[in-house]
Structure formats: structure tokens, C-alpha cells
Image (cartoon, rainbow, N blue to C red):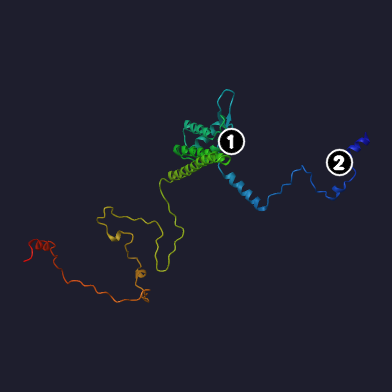
Amino acid sequence: MAGGGAELGERRGGRQKGTPNKATAEVPNIAPQDAPAAVSLPGPRTQARIQAAKQQTKARSIRPEVKLTSHEGQQVQIDSAHADGEGHSFHLLDAFGTSSPPFAEAMLGQLAGVVRTRSDSVDEGSLNAGLAAVDGIAPQNEAEAMLAVQMAGTHSVAMEMLRKAKFATSIPALQEYGNLATKLLRTYTTQMECLAKVRRRGEQKVTVEHVHVYPGGQAVVGNITQTGNREGVGAESDQQSHAPTRSTDFSALAYAPGASVWSHDPLREAVSVSCGKGPEPMPDARRDQRRRARGPG
């Protein structure tokens, strides 16, 4: 048995346990073929970026999450992901910018219906991702909440159309899915612009960062309000924005003598134009017709 064991060891390992292998002794650091490759540690710049990312992630707001439970023969029920049910309800109300529980439940149901896959089941991860997107938009009222749910749904369907366009096997299918994806992406951009317009309440802000004033020029930096009479009656020049004031420096408008600039064309003699002196009566055009009708004499 002992000899058989030694012979089996030579067949499997090439040599017995106590006998050194020549190839192993020459290259001792070679790992076996099925062993995973060694993973290097992140460098200093990567470690610094990781630390900054940790701080930023910890400073971000925690998004609400839900848990889906289903039983045989029953519909899917949306529950809290933790034991504090009351706190979870307030978290959802704040995510949808409302104080109405029925409104929050309706928006959550619509969001679950639009992010679901083709199967009848609702994916818990997809629903929580859509809920995080709505909470990230941070709607301030019910109108913004409805727009946020629409944006999440538009993005989900647009990505689905892009995926189908990528794996399309025919040109008509590629064109159809590509056109739908393009329209949905344009709709998403329009929704973003609409949300920004609603939040700034139609106001436009123009920021001037660089103002260049050259020698002899003037510039006014600040809020300029121009008032005037809409009817144009009683408007005086001193009320206009371009009217000079007592503090206006007219040196920039003064005449600066200098050399004359000649044109490229040579000078020519002036052409005299004959003209009458003083007003003259307009001749009657009917006089010749009367003479022709009477005849000569």
C-alpha cells in the first residue's frame, strides 16, 4: 500500500512530497493556471478620488426605497423597506412634494406601471431607481411631481427603444425604434426646459462676466432701468438712457484733427447741372391738344 501510494503521488504530482521539482525550484513564483490574477492596490490619485467620493456620497440625501411583497393569488403590495412605517410615509410625501397620501400613492403606482418590464411583475430595483430619480428632481408641488414622474417614464421608455434599436436585425426595425427613441429624448429635453422655466417663473437672468472698456469709451456696470412714456407724449430727452447728463465726459466726442484720408479714385472735374432760378409755373398739357383740335390759324 505504501509503495502504491508513492507511485500514485509520482503520477499526480510528478514527484513525491519530499523530492524537489526542478521546474518549481527554478521558477517558484509561478501561480497555477486556475488561480485568479493578483489585483493591485489603487494608486495615490485613485485613493484621493475614492475618499472624495465617500465624503460626497455621505453628504447626499438618502433616497426613499420600497419593498414589494406578493402572495399567491394577490396583487403586489408596496411596503416600507424598514420598520418605521410612519417615517417611510413622510419620506414618500416629501419625495413627491405633497401632503396628500392619496396623491403620493397614485404617483407611486403610475411610476411602478411605467418602469415595469414586459412581464406582469414589477421589478423592485427598477421602481426604487425611478423613485430615486423623482426624489432627485425634488418637486416642490403636485404639478412638479407629475412632471417628474413623466420624465422618469420618458427616460425609461427611451432607453428601451435605444436597446431595441441597437439589437435590431433589419433596417426598418432600426429606423422605427431609432425614430421613437429620438422623439422620446427630445420630449425629455423639453420636459427639462419646462421644469426650469416653471421654477424660475419666466424670469431670465443674464450674467456679464467680462467688460472691456477701451481708452475714450465709457461703460455702465449694474442694473439699468429704462422708463419712458408709452404714448410718446411729454417724453423729454433728459429722461432717455442716451441723454447726456452733467457728469457726462464729452472729451470722447471731441473732434480730433489729423491727416486727411484720400480715396483710391482720382479726383475729377465737377459736372455742372443746369437749373432754373426761382419757381416757374407748370405748363398746361392740354394746351397743345386744344390747338390741334382748332387747326392752324
Q: Residue at x 52, y 32 (%)?
A: 113
Q: Residue furthest front?
A: 296
Tell me the tag on residue 125.
Answer: 1
Q: Residue at x 93, y 36 (%)?
A: 3
* Quarter of the rendering containing residue 33: top right
Answer with left or right where residue 39 lies relative to residue 226. right
Residue 122 in percent (x, y) is at 56, 31
Say if residue 23 shows up in the picture. yes
Query: Label 2: few (<14), some or many (≥20) within 10 Å?
Result: few
Answer with left or right where residue 25 lies relative to residue 100. right
Residue 41 higher or lower than 158, as above or below: below
Tell me the tag on residue 199.
Answer: none
Residue 55 in percent (x, y) is at 60, 47
Hey, what amino acid is under mark 2? Gly
Q: Quadrant of the C terminus?
A: bottom left
User: Helix or strand or loop: what does disc 1 sit on?
Assistant: helix
**Residue nearest the observer in this picture, 37 or 262:** 262
Q: Which residue is mark 2?
A: 13
Answer with left or right where residue 217 lies relative to residue 160. left
Hey, what amino acid is under mark 1? Gly
